[in-house]
Image (spheres, rainbow, N blue to C red):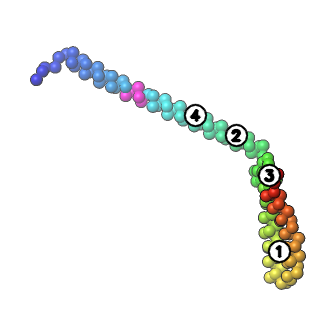
Amino acid sequence: MTIPTTSSFNSINGLQGNIQFKKLQYTHERTLNQQNNAHELEMQQKQFEHEDKQKAQDLGTLGRYFGGGEHSSRNITAVICLVLIVGAALVSGVIYWQTQDKSLIASIWNKVIPLIALSLGYIFGKK
C-alpha cells in the first residue's frame, strides 16, 4: 500500500473542482437553452396571433363564415343549396301533415330542384 502524497491530494481536488465546474457550465448552458426556447416559442405565438388578427381583418364578418378568395362563392352556393333542401323539406312536411296536398308539394320541389341542380353545377363544374 502506498501512502498518498500532497501532490496526489492536489490532483484529486483539481479533478473534483473540474467536475464541479463542468456541472456548473452544463447547468448554465441548459438554463440559457431553456430561456432561448421559451423566447422563441413566445415570439412564434405572438406572430401567430398577429397573423390570425390580420386574416380576420382581411376576411371581414362574412368572410369568417364563408371563407375568402376563390372559395367564398362556392361556399355561399353550398349554403344556399342546403337552405333550399332543408327549407323545401320542412315546408313539404308541414303541408303534407296539415293538408296532404301532394300536388302543392310536387310544385314546390319542381321549383326547388332546378335551383339545386344549377347550384351543384356551379359548385362542381369546371372553372
Which is the main secondary structure of the residues drawn in magenta?
helix
2 or 1: tag closer to the N-terminus: 2
Badge 1, how many Cα within 10 Å: few under 14, some, many 20+?
few
Q: Amino acid at mark 3?
A: Ser
Q: Where residue 81 sits: x, y (%)?
A: 80, 63
Position above or below: 62 against 6: below
Amino acid type, residue under disc 4 in the picture: Glu
Residue at screen point 85% across, 82% down: 102
Q: Nearer the viewer, residue 109 or 90?
A: 109
- Secondary structure of the residue carrying numbered label 4: helix
Pick whichever of labels 4 and 1 is earlier in the sequence: 4
Camera-nearest label, 3 or 4? 3
Q: SS class of the residue under badge 2?
A: helix
Give the residue number, with chain letter if any, for mark 2.
Answer: 51
**Disc 3, SS:** helix
Residue 124 visible in the current orientation: yes
**Residue 91 numbered tag:** 1
Q: Is residue 98 left or right of residue 39?
A: right
Residue at image position (83%, 65%) is 116
Please tell me in which quadrant of the rendered image residue 86 appears. Answer: bottom right
Residue annotated with mark 3:
72
Q: Is residue 76 visible?
A: no
Of the residues shown, which amino acid type is indicated by label 1?
Val
Q: Residue at x 46, y 31 (%)?
A: 31
Mark 4 lies on residue: 40
